[in-house]
Image (spheres, rainbow, N blue to C red):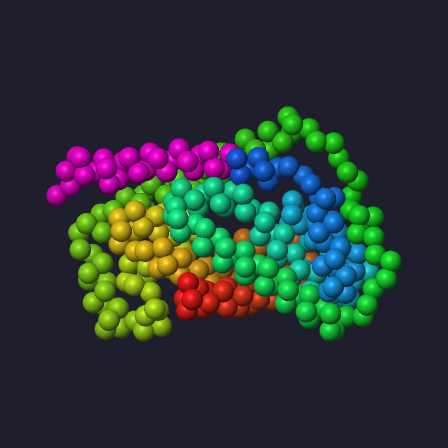
Amino acid sequence: MFSLPDLWSGLFFPLLKLGFFISLGVFVGNLIEAMNWTRAMAMLATPLVRAGRLKDISGASFSMAFFSGITANTMLAEAYEQKKLNRKELVLSNLFNSLPTYFLHLPTTFFIIAPLIKAAAVPYLLLTISSAVLRTLVVIFIGRFILPAKKDQCIRCELPPSTRLVWSEILAKVRLRFGTRFKKVMMFTVPIYTLFYILLNTGFFALVEQFMADHVSALSFLPPQAIGVVVLQLAAEFSAGLAAAGALLDSGALGIKEIVLALITGNILSSPMRAIRHQLPYYAGIFSPALALRLIIYNQTLRAGSLMVVGWGYYVWG
């Protein structure tokens, strides 16, 4: 059913090419992530903190979140315990860190996404960046109206002492992260890319299209092939959805817009479960369990809402 030339051109060669670019991308992304420019980020934080009437410790946490989410949240938790932040300020400060937390993993994310979904990577990343910016603007807007004005802010004063850049430590950190992330991505990419290649060439999606026409209406704005991308993001990891999306895009079964909408939809639906699985354990170790759960709910609600807004805009005008 599958000739060797077809398998080489449609499956083996694309997988070899993907493996090379993903390994290169993960390495470069991790190298960028390991560079620490915390104090430079304080310059960005200052006008935003003042606009949202947040405290200097909130700005310091914002700056630190570009490089360590755990450290940023620890700073907020300690300030809350010491009564430097009240509950409203803590919640808004934690939500405020959504933008730097996004950019913390953006280099690695980009270099994983780009080889898999190619031209679709740009609109997808622009939408997710827009949603992160939108969340920040919402937090600033709310803080502007519910918090009192602050004076004499010194964000850099709240940051930990600056440390000298040591390349041996940076490269050691990159090697450790590279091995973990590359194995995880390829573990999903190879079998899923192969599976979707087989499904696309055996008429499976024709059956799915008929089933959708008869039973599924909530996701009717997506073509049937895109449902597999959403399901894989729900059932497995984001890398699984990307691998499926890449296979569908390479085969011509879906266009860029359909791929982007499928990934955004899967992102919205899968985020709450991923947050409980990955965020809750370390959040509960920093904050009290009840407060940790509340912060996660606030974060996921705002995140889903912002993704819906930008996703709807792309669906209508993209």
- Find the magenta span and give its range: 1-27
Q: Nearer the viewer, residue 287 or 150?
A: 150
Task: Please provide percent x and percent y for residue 171.
Answer: 59, 29
Q: Position of residue 239 (x, y in %)?
A: 42, 48
Report the residue at 22% width, 58% height from top: 205
- Which residue ends up furthest to the left in the rendered image? 1
Q: Where is residue 77 drawn, in percent x and y?
A: 73, 56
Q: Is residue 215 above or below residue 49?
A: below
- In this rendering, the answer to whether 83 lies above or below 4 is below
Q: Nearer the viewer, residue 125 or 243?
A: 125
Assign the magenta stretch its main secondary structure: helix
Q: Is residue 2 magenta?
A: yes
Compared with 231, 117 (above or below) is above
Task: Look at the image and say whether residue 18 sits in the magenta stretch.
Answer: yes
Q: Quadrant of residue 82?
A: bottom right
Residue at the image point whose x is 35% and y is 35% from the top: 17
